[in-house]
Image (tube, rainbow, N blue to C red):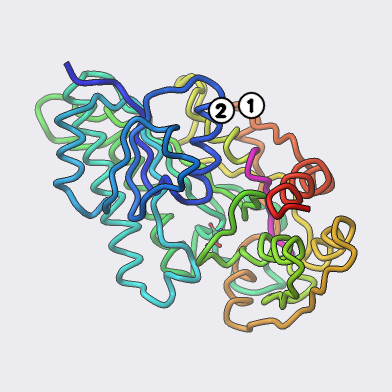
Amino acid sequence: MRKPVILITGAGGEIGHGLIERLWEESRPAIITIDLNPLDASLHDRVSRELTGSILDTNLLERILSEYEVDMVFHLAALLSTRGEFTPVTAHQVNVEGTLNVLDFAQKQGESHGRAVVFLYPSSIAAYGLPDLETRGRAGKVREHEWNVPTTMYGCNKLYCEHLGRYFNHHYKQLAAEKLSGKVDFRAIRFPGLISAETVPSGGTSDYAPEMIHAAARGEPYACFVRPDTRIPFMAMPDAVDALLALARAERTRLRYNVYNIGAFNPSAEEIRQMVLEGFPEADIRFEPDLKRQAIVDSWPEDVDDSAARTDWGLSPRYGFREAFHDYLFPHIAARYGH
Ligand code: SER
């Protein structure tokens, strides 16, 4: 008898950290993880089994298949948008081929134990691509089906994998004699930029917000790589984890779509600087835009319409802009850096 578990890929990353902590606090379910690197010591006793390796290693996935019954997958492993532009082929391998491997794994799991495997996929505002600032200003809050013309390898990968997930969910091997689709219950969230008090991201292009506050907390100067007026949606990490779990637990019949926007607040980079100064009045933050990274952020929407998520599965972030900083980030970051 194989053991029923939750699988988390890329478990050592930003979202993985928050997710594993939350699952542990809530119900201590059996979790197996895959990450290229060993997990932080703080997460060791939170998981039943930790596999150090790559989602490109199909032998690793086969091993899990033979030993465990997986009912839910959080497929978090990815190369983010800035890093992906330096190594686009590797980004494609990890983000697309890796996702295909994990979807295929989930399909086999579902076929083998007979239940649908709930597959949570973090997509991104990077799936959007707006051609210029004027259009972007006019577009305002974008809906899921609008402006799906990403400019980054990462964004292209995310958008395509949303389609792959929908394919596995609804159309997998549609010409076979028996119905094989529906074994993967694919659910994706297009995340905005995320800000965590516990971890600093690496390789993303929305990283200026978390970098700004973590640098301030460490007492280090920070040169922000986008213009002060740059505005994209953001969310505090606890709300991102809540959203993933709310979507994971939603009744399938209530979900009209496979992919949902979510957002919480959308300050400009200057408004973020001002807010950081409320918590760290000595912070030394200046603007030194990197025109190329700026262009990536400028192709992302300034806000998203997340009404479908609110209606279908009850998205309701706890933290607005001020609360995210004053009630979550400042107290937790101060503790983290020993203030
Ligand atoms: N935060 C991600 C990045 O900047 C976007 O999903 O790449």
Residue ID for mark 2:
246
Seen in the picture, residue 221 relative to 157 is either above or below; the reply is below
Judge left or right: residue 123 versus residue 330.
left
Name the residue located 77 percent from the left edge and 68 percent from the top edge. 219
Seen in the picture, residue 31 relative to 156 is either above or below; the reply is above
Quarter of the image with the N terminus in it: top left
| Residue 196 percent coordinates (x, y) | 64, 50
Name the amino acid type tagged 1: Gly
Residue ID for mark 1:
314
Q: Which residues are magenta?
A: 231-238
- Label 2 within 8 A of ligand 1 by Cβ: no
N-terminal of the pair, mark 2 or mark 1, is 2
Q: Where on the picture, by quarter, is residue 136?
A: bottom right
| Nearest the eye: 215 or 157 | 215
Name the residue located 56 percent from the left edge and 59 percent from the top edge. 201
Name the residue located 38 percent from the left edge and 39 percent from the top edge. 8
| Residue 221 percent coordinates (x, y) | 75, 75
Judge left or right: residue 72 versus residue 205.
left
Judge left or right: residue 186 versus residue 93.
right
Neighbourhood count class around disc 2 (C-alpha, 10 Å): few under 14, some 14–19, many 20 upward:
some
- Identify the element where label 1 is drawn: loop
| Residue 100 percent coordinates (x, y) | 26, 49
